[in-house]
Image (cartoon, rainbow, N blue to C red):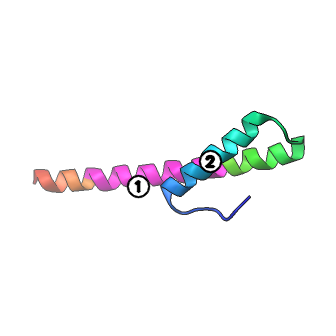
Amino acid sequence: MTKKPTDYDKAMLQLEKLVERIQQGQMGLEEMRGEVKAALELIKLCRTKLRDIETDLDELLDEEEE
């Protein structure tokens, strides 16, 4: 697996590539295990980024209402 991204868009792109590789099913079990583990880490990162953005947007909207 390549370097873990810190940007949502890059993480999603990497996740899409991993899912595509997993779905092709042309790898051994150990390699698949590693790819699934990497995909789960990317999903966690994306969820965190989305929560952070949602919080930021909520705060901005709350400020606008005041």
Task: Tell me which secondary structure the magenta stretch mostly adopts.
Answer: helix
Residue at position x 58%, y 62% from top? 5
Residue at position x 73%, y 42% from top? 21
26 relative to 62 in the view: left or right: right
Magenta residue span: 40-58
Q: How many marks?
A: 2
Q: Which residue is mark 1?
A: 52
The picture places residue 36, in percent across and down from the top left corner, at 74, 44
Q: Is residue 1 magenta?
A: no
Q: Is residue 45 visible?
A: yes
Above or below residue 10? Residue 40 is above
Residue at position x 52%, y 50% from top? 46
Above or below residue 19? Residue 1 is below
Task: Report the front residue among 5 and 27.
Answer: 27
Q: Which mark is residue 15?
A: 2
Q: Quadrant of the N terminus?
A: bottom right
